[in-house]
Image (tube, grey):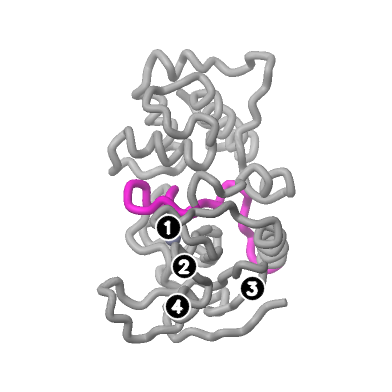
Amino acid sequence: MILDTPSSNWNDRQNGLSAEYIIIHYTGTKTADEAKKRFLDTDPQDGVGRISPHYMIGADGEIYKFVEEDKRAWHAGVSKWKDIQDMNSASIGIEIWNSGHEYDFEEFSAVQIEALLELIVDIRTRWNIPDKNILGHSDIAPGRKKDPGEKFPWRKLEINGVGLMPQIACDDTYPPREFLDNPERFYEGLVKFGYSNEVPHDVLLQEFRRHYVPKSFGLTDLDEETCMALLSLLDQLEKDNPQVAYSL
Ligand SMILES: [Zn+2]
């Protein structure tokens, strides 16, 4: 069930952009109620300005709707993916209640993830949003944002048909040495995948792992698993879209 809690914090989508992406966030607040009040606040005093997602999922999987899907909600802030800098105009934003890195950063609950899956399936009946365009705030604002965080179960979403994740084969189809021996190539690959080229390499590596290679999250050096993950993702994009095939 969706609870209508209309916010005034929105405007029209700009520059012909429409909902092509879904951006997932955590609220980073002690309670969902605190976040809800913040998204409805038209005169916030915390220096951040007016903000809003399209939807928020509460602690028990309840879904709040703040902004109509065809309007531009204000959740992405300064961000970049591929050549899009106005990600608010190109996306639907979903916040999930979680206290975040500043507090307890609890596990996301099964009911929250079930609600999220249902919501995304429903949104996709109206908008053409491919799996590769389901991203975290940390992907589009690396170094500035960590949400939804390394505990977010991206793989569980992918198993349920939502989002793109590495498919690592055991038959050594991929040549991870290509990246291990030439880290510059690895970073070029990250930018081809969509990450900003205006962010330090160590930050990009960390944010890529936070979403796509949680097993290697926290490592500092480039490892085989991470290289294979990126190769697999690029390979999937190529199969998806052969006319813009990725080439090293
Ligand atoms: Zn966020």
Q: Which residues are magenta?
A: 124-148
Measure the alpha-carbon separation of dots 3 and 1. 23 Å
33 or 92, nearer to the observer: 33
Tag 2 residue: 30
Which of disc 1 and disc 4 is earlier in sequence? 4
Residue visible at 45% across and 23% down?
A: 248
SS majority, magenta: loop
Measure the alpha-carbon separation of dots 3 and 4. 14 Å
Left/right of residue 17 with respect to residue 241 in the rendered view: left
Measure the alpha-carbon separation of dots 3 and 2. 17 Å
- 231 in relation to 135, above or below: above
Residue visible at 68% across and 78% down?
A: 2
2 and 1 marks in contact (CB < 8 Å): yes
Q: Which mark is residue 103?
A: 1
Q: Position of residue 231 (x, y in %)?
A: 54, 27
Which of disc 2 and disc 4 is earlier in sequence? 2
Q: Nearer the viewer, mark 4 or mark 1?
A: 1
Question: Which amino acid, mark 1?
Answer: Tyr
Measure the alpha-carbon separation of dots 4 and 2. 15 Å
Q: Is residue 137 visible?
A: no
Q: Position of residue 18 (x, y in %)?
A: 52, 67
* Disc 2 element: loop
Q: Nearer the viewer, mark 3 or mark 2?
A: 2
* Disc 3 element: strand
* Disc 4 element: helix
Tag 3 residue: 63
Tag 4 residue: 39
Point out the quarter of the image occupied by ligand 1.
bottom left
